[in-house]
């Protein structure tokens, strides 16, 4: 007998027929003798509608009331899923985040989970009951409902699996696993049977949409084995595991891309100590995340600082820099939203030389100019013109022999 958390995303519970399908999958797992807990997202499109209503009433809405509104999407799904399970003869009960309780900090709209009181759920699961938990939500120090930010139901599921000491956390989506790259761009992309937490974290952080970054961080920290599966097929999925569980380690696990980047260049900044802080501290204080950074020093004592931000943050980033112009002392700012970040990820890079060289040579042979480069121990990322995104991904996928 295993203890399993099954999480279903918005497309998996998009309508009543799909909720019935979810209930049948959950009941089948329970019928095998397993203890099962379920975490659900809001029905596809429901959260967008709720957010839209908040914004139409007031662009500067109170974040506490925003959370009270958007958390209802998951509450509806949890109740409906429990009803569907009861209709199949299962003992099921829905739970809101505050009932468990999923305790969070007070950052409304992007709260972080601090603890989960799981004893009551464990006792009920031992008795054969199936808890259906509303994902994406918790309760803050002020005793008000909080939400965890976009993709937060993945984090809810992994956190619950850790609190329940579950054998694994199955995350059901509209894809049947983690692929070497986006199959819509590269039809020869291969599904991976296993991938390490570190590789999945890097892929998620640089554009892969399969799992939310925070959920992978939490799974790695708590050693929760995560399986990515499709709600719409019985195909085997991808296990996200510790590195020592992957026997044959590929040099490159996958190619990811993100079109959500924008490039900012601050030109002719005085080349003196503290100038980087003058640029990046105000951006951090405005909660603008900066990614790739490159600095070019000129002979005349000035420097150009180029970096990337999220495309939606570009107007705010520009405004922050213009306000700080006097302190920074730059000549001008140029921006380019038409860029894409392409990343090659693999833990095998630690022990193999030449991965970056293959990437640069492959892009050069296709006439693709590299604008910015950044690296980590298991990742190489480059910034290129957005029009070359698909060509770059296909070429690199073939160059690293990832084609099926």
Image (spheres, rainbow, N blue to C red):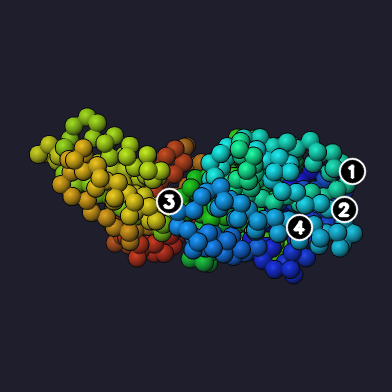
Residue 2, horizontal then vertical, whole percent: 81, 43
Closest to the observer, 119 or 154: 119
Please report the residue visible at 39 percent of the width from the left and 56 percent of the height from the top. 312
> What is the spatial separation of the Cα atoms under label 1 and label 4, in whole angstroms?
20 Å
Q: In the rendered image, which quarter is residue 16 located in?
A: bottom right
Q: Secondary structure at mark 4?
A: helix
Q: Which residue is mark 2?
A: 91
Quarter occupied by the N terminus: top right
Q: Is residue 117 left or right of residue 273?
A: right
> What is the spatial separation of the Cα atoms under label 3 and label 4, in whole angstroms?
41 Å
Whether pointer 1 and pointer 2 mark residues with C-beta atoms closer than 8 Å, the reply is yes
Whether pointer 3 and pointer 2 mark residues with C-beta atoms closer than 8 Å, the reply is no
Residue 80 appears anywhere in the view: yes
| Mark 2 or mark 4, earlier in chain | 4
Residue 349, horizontal then vertical, whole percent: 46, 41
Q: Is residue 311 left or right of residue 297?
A: right
> What is the spatial separation of the Cα atoms under label 3 and label 2, in whole angstroms?
46 Å
Query: Residue 79, labelled with which disc?
Result: 4
């Amino acid at each position: 007998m295993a203890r399993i958390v099954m999480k279903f995303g918005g497309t998996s519970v998009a309508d009543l027929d799909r909720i019935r399908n979810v209930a049948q999958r959950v009941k089948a797992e329970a019928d095998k003798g397993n203890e099962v807990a379920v975490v659900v997202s809001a029905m596809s499109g429901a959260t967008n509608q709720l957010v839209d209503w908040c914004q139409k009433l007031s662009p500067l809405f109170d974040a506490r009331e925003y959370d009270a509104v958007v958390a209802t999407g998951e509450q509806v799904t949890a109740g409906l899923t429990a009803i569907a399970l009861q209709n199949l003869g299962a003992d099921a009960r829905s739970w809101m985040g505050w009932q468990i309780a999923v305790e969070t900090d007070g950052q409304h709209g992007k709260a972080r989970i601090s603890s989960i009181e799981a004893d009551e759920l464990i006792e009920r699961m031992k008795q054969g009951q199936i808890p259906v938990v509303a994902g994406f939500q918790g309760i803050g120090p002020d005793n008000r409902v909080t939400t965890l930010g976009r993709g937060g139901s993945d984090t809810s599921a992994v956190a619950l699996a850790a609190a329940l000491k579950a054998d694994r956390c199955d995350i059901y989506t509209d894809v049947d696993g983690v692929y070497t790259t986006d199959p819509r761009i590269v039809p020869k992309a291969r599904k991976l049977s296993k991938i390490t937490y570190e590789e999945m974290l890097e892929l998620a952080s640089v554009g892969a949409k399969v799992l939310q970054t925070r959920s992978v961080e939490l799974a790695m920290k708590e050693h929760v084995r995560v399986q990515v599966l499709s709600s719409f097929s019985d195909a085997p999925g991808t296990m996200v595991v510790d590195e020592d569980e992957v026997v044959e380690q590929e040099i490159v696990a996958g190619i990811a891309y993100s079109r959500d980047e924008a490039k900012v260049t601050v030109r002719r900044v005085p080349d003196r100590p503290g100038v980087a802080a003058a640029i990046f501290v105000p951006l951090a204080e405005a909660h603008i995340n900066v990614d790739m950074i490159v600095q070019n020093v000129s002979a005349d004592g000035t420097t150009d600082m180029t970096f990337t931000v999220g495309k939606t943050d570009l107007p705010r980033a520009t405004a922050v820099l213009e306000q700080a112009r006097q302190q920074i002392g730059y000549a001008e700012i140029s921006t380019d939203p038409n860029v894409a970040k392409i990343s090659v990820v693999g833990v095998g890079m630690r022990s193999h030389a030449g991965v970056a060289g293959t990437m640069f040579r492959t892009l050069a042979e296709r006439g693709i100019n590299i604008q910015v480069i950044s690296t980590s121990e298991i990742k190489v990322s480059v910034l290129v013109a957005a029009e070359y995104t698909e060509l770059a991904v296909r070429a690199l996928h073939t160059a690293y022999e990832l084609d099926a």
